[in-house]
Amino acid sequence: MKAEALVVEEQSQGQEPPMGGSRRSRAGQLADPEAATPRVAKRKRWDVAYKLRIAEEAEKCKHRKGELAALARREGLYSCTLTKWMQWRRTMDEKGFDVTPDGKSKRSMRNEMKRLERENERLKTKLRRAEGLIELQKKVSRLLEDLSDAGQSES
């Protein structure tokens, strides 16, 4: 009897009942629909500048005991992620990839430049066509104006 009173008291205080029971409203529906569906974690993404900064910090503290683990905890990263980033940074240094302060590599900047040059050429071609059409419209307008003037002078 005391146990049933305890369950009723817990339910009235908004706590979960023991034994995995669910909190339901009077209509029998779940009180909180968000609680019924599990949340799916989104994949984390870090920009290059952040990776470089953390990899440099990790390189500095990898020789001191416990510092690498403290860095991983502070940043919310796994130690294997730090190891991969440090390895990636060493590879970048060995292959001679220069990285700009905003984190972009020179190679990615060259690729971006090529893409922008292609877009620039495409837009120049589009502009030349548009200017040609405008010139054509001007000529047609003048011809129609001349025909209109000639028709009025005959009448």
Image: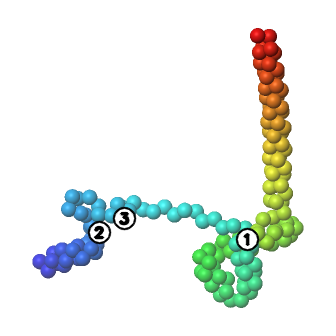
CA separation in Å, label 3 and label 1: 37 Å
Residue density around tag 2, few if under 14, some if 14–19, many if 20 or more, within 10 Å: few
Quadrant of the image occupied by residue 126: top right
Label 3: element kind: helix
Which mark is first along the chain, 1 or 2? Answer: 2
Q: Are circles 3 and 1 on residues that touch, CB within 8 Å?
A: no
Name the residue located 11 percent from the left edge and 77 percent from the top edge. Answer: 1
Q: Quadrant of the C terminus?
A: top right
Q: Quadrant of residue 147?
A: top right
Identify residue for label 3. Answer: 35
Which residue is the site of mark 1? 49
Cα distance in 3D space between marks 2 and 1: 46 Å
Q: Is residue 128 above or below residue 62?
A: above
Q: Quadrant of residue 121?
A: top right
Q: Which mark is residue 20?
A: 2
Choose mark 2 or mark 1, whichever is in front.
1
Q: Earlier in the sequence, mark 3 or mark 1?
A: 3
**Please, which residue is most extreme toward the bottom here?**
64
User: Within 10 angstroms of label 3, few (less than 14), some, or many (20 or more) residues?
Assistant: few
Could you tell me the amino acid type at mark 2? Gly
C-alpha distance separating marks 2 and 3: 14 Å
Q: Amino acid at mark 1?
A: Ala
Q: Nearer the viewer, mark 2 or mark 3?
A: 3
Viewer-side label of 3, 1 = 1
Which residue does the image show at 85% across and 68% down from the upper left?
A: 98
Residue 31 appears in the picture as rendered: yes
Residue at 71% x, 89% y: name it: 64
